[in-house]
Image (spheres, rainbow, N blue to C red):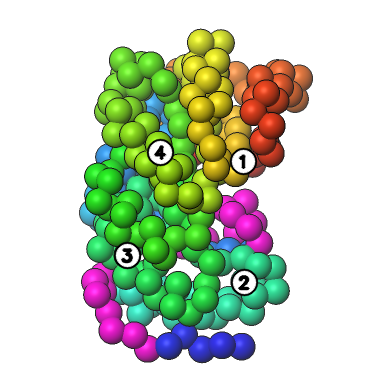
Amino acid sequence: MRNIKERQILVSKGTIFDIKKFAVHDGPGIRTTIFFKGCPLDCWWCHNPEGRHTGIEKLPIQENRNRSSITANKNAETSGKEITLTEIMRDIEKDLIFYEESQGGVTFSGGEPLMQIDFLTSLLKNCHSNGIHTLVDTCGYASWSCFESILPYTDMFYYDLKLIDDAEHIKYTGVSNKTILSNLEKLVQHDQRITIRIPLIPGITDTDKNLKEIVKLLKKMNNIQSIMLLPYNKLGEDKYRRFGLPLRTGKLLAYDNGNLEAIKKRFDALNLNISIESGHHE
Ligand code: SF4
C-alpha cells in the first residue's frame, strides 16, 4: 500500500458536514465522499437541508409527542465541523487499498464544494499528487475562475442540471441558471469527463417542457459522458420533519418503474449511457 506523501499545505481547514466511506454510488469504484458545508442554491427538494448553510449550526430536533402536535424538544443536532486537510488525508489513506482494487477514489460533494474553493483545491492537489482518482459533484454555480483552478486536479465532474427555464430556476432554487449553463458549456469545451445529473422532482423538473429543453441543450454538447436521473424519493421528507423545516414541495408521490422508464426513453436520442439512480438523491 502506498503512503500519502507529506506535502506543503495551502489551505489547511474547511467545514464539512459528513464523510461517507465505502460509497458505491458516488462515482467509479469504492469511494470516500466528503460533504462540504454550504450551498449557494436553496432547492425546494434539497435532500441535505442540514448541509445548505455555511458554517456550523445547531438544528433543533422536533419530536411528535402526542401525534396531534409537533413540539420542539431540548435536543439539537449540530451540523458541520471544522476539519483539517491532514485529518481528511489520514482518513483517505486508510482506504487506499480499496480505491486501488476497485478503481475508486475520492468524491467531493455537499452542499457545494466549490464554495470552499481554496480548501477544495488543496484537497484535490493532495489526492492528485498521490494518484487518487478525484470527482467533484457540483451544482455549477460558481465563478469560472473557481473551475479553472481545479481543472488540473479533477478527473471527473458530476454536474447537476435542474431547470432550463430561468424564471423557474430562480423560483425553485433561488438563483438564475445563467452561470450554471455557461460554466457547463466551458467545461465541455475543456474536454472534461462530465456526467450530467438530473433530479426528477414530480411536477417541477420532470415536466414535458423541461425534459425536452434539457435534451435539446445536451444534444448540442459533445463530451458528455453519461446521464444520471435521480428520482425524488420520500426519505428526505423525514429530515424536514425532524428539523421542523417547511416542506415547500408539499407531499409528492414517489415514482414507479413504469414512469421512470418512460422518462429515461426521452434521453435515448442522445446515445449516451443513461442510468436511473433510485437510491441516490440530491
Ligand atoms: S444544489 Fe444540491 S445541495 Fe444545494 S440546495 Fe440544491 S439540492 Fe441542496
Q: What is the magenta range?
A: 6-29
Q: Residue at x 46, y 85 (%)?
A: 4
Circle 2 is placed at which residue position?
A: 99
Residue 162 in the figure: left or right of residue 253: left
Q: Which mark is residue 121?
A: 3
- SS at badge 3: helix
Under mark 3, the amino acid is: Thr
Residue 282 in picture, x, y percent from top left = 49, 38
Circle 4 is placed at which residue position?
A: 184
Q: CA distance from mark 4 to mark 2?
A: 28 Å
Q: Residue at x 55, y 42 (%)?
A: 223
Do we see residue 241 in this rendering? no
Q: CA distance from mark 4 to mark 1?
A: 14 Å
Q: Residue at x 44, y 60 (%)?
A: 154
Q: Neighbour class for label 4 at 10 Å: few (<14), some, many (≥20)?
A: many
The residue lying furthest to the right in this view is: 258
Residue 152 in picture, x, y percent from top left = 39, 63
